[in-house]
Each structure stands twice: as structure tokens, then as C-alpha cells.
Image (spheres, rainbow, N blue to C red):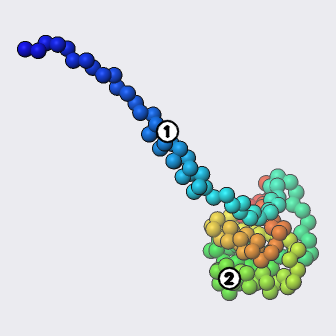
């Protein structure tokens, strides 16, 4: 019988392959990241606690109803599509793109319809887009 104890080898971690995998992942994430500065809309949001400013005589007003339909300066659009809203804005503004646009949305209107109105106004060339709010002291509908 052979009673000599076996020599045990200590476990050895090969760090070279681990470092290679980490560097490959780092390169992959660096190359797959988007480095695009997306265009941003410049919004001037009114403060809800302050007194509302006087509305200028020449301004465009987009109303968003609870059902998601749009009205531009009190006139209803043909339907609730972004194309119909863009056509109504084009008809109302003429060649003046410096008019301020105020978006008045019903409290029960969906967020998507308000964002669509903001997007259409921004794509039409308007840079001063305001969102109307109710003063805290006023009665809410």
C-alpha cells in the first residue's frame, strides 16, 4: 500500500483572461454609446404661485381638451392628429414665427396630447412656448 500523502496544489486564478473580458466590455460600451446632443425646446414655464402675466394681443393659443382634441385661437382643428394641428398653426401664424404660443390643457387631458402640441409647435418654428396654469388662489374648474 502506498501511504504517501499527495501534494496538493494551491488554486491559481488566471487574471489575464478576466482583465481581457473587462476591457472588451469597456470598449463595447464606449462604442455603443450615443454622443448626439438632441435639440431641446426652450420653454418658459409660468410660476403657479405668482400672478399671471397679461396676455399679449398677438399670440397663438392652443387648447387641449380632455378628449385630446385641439383648438387654435378658439377654432377647432379638423381632427386630433398632429398634421391637422400643424396645418391650423400654419394658417393662424402666417409668416410670423416669433409669436408666443400658449398651451392651455384641460386637467384631464392626457400627457401625450400636451406633448404632441408642444412638439408640433416646436417643429413649426416657434421658440417661445408657454404652458398656462391656474393660480393657487383661483377656483379650479
Across and down, in percent, residue 54 comes to 91, 66
The alpha-carbon separation of the residues under discs 1 and 2 comes to 54 Å
Q: Under tag 1, what secondary structure?
A: helix
Residues 139 and 69: in front is 69
Residue for point 86% across, 77% down: 97
Q: Mark 1 vs mark 2: give the one in front.
A: 1
Mark 2 neighbour density, 10 Å: few (under 14) some (14–19) many (20 or more) = few
Across and down, in percent, residue 95 comes to 87, 83
Q: Which residue is mark 1?
A: 19
User: Where is the C terminus found, in terms of image quarters?
Assistant: bottom right
Residues 15 and 38: in front is 15
- Compared to residue 36, the image places residue 124 above or below, namely below
Which circle marks residue 83 in the picture?
2
Across and down, in percent, residue 5 comes to 20, 14
Residues 22 and 140: in front is 22
Q: Earlier in the sequence, mark 1 or mark 2?
A: 1
Residue 129 appears in which quarter of the rendering? bottom right
Relative placement, left or right, of 31 versus 123 is: left
Residue for point 53% across, 44% down: 23
Residue for point 80% across, 59% down: 45
Report if residue 108 is visible in the image.
Answer: no
- Count of residue discs: 2
Amino acid at each position: 500500500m502506498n501511504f504517501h500523502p499527495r501534494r496538493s496544489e494551491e488554486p491559481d486564478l488566471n487574471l489575464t483572461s478576466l482583465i481581457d473580458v473587462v476591457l472588451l466590455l469597456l470598449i463595447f460600451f464606449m462604442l455603443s454609446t450615443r454622443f448626439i446632443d438632441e435639440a431641446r425646446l426652450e420653454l418658459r414655464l409660468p410660476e403657479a404661485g405668482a400672478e399671471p402675466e397679461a396676455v399679449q394681443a398677438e399670440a397663438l393659443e392652443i387648447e387641449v381638451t380632455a378628449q385630446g382634441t385641439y383648438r387654435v385661437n378658439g377654432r377647432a382643428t379638423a381632427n386630433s392628429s398632429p398634421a391637422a394641428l400643424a396645418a391650423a398653426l400654419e394658417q393662424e401664424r402666417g409668416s410670423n414665427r416669433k409669436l408666443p404660443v400658449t398651451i392651455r390643457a384641460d386637467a384631464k387631458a392626457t400627457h401625450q396630447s400636451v406633448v404632441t402640441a408642444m412638439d408640433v409647435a416646436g417643429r413649426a418654428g416657434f421658440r417661445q412656448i408657454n404652458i398656462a396654469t391656474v393660480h393657487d388662489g383661483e377656483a379650479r374648474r
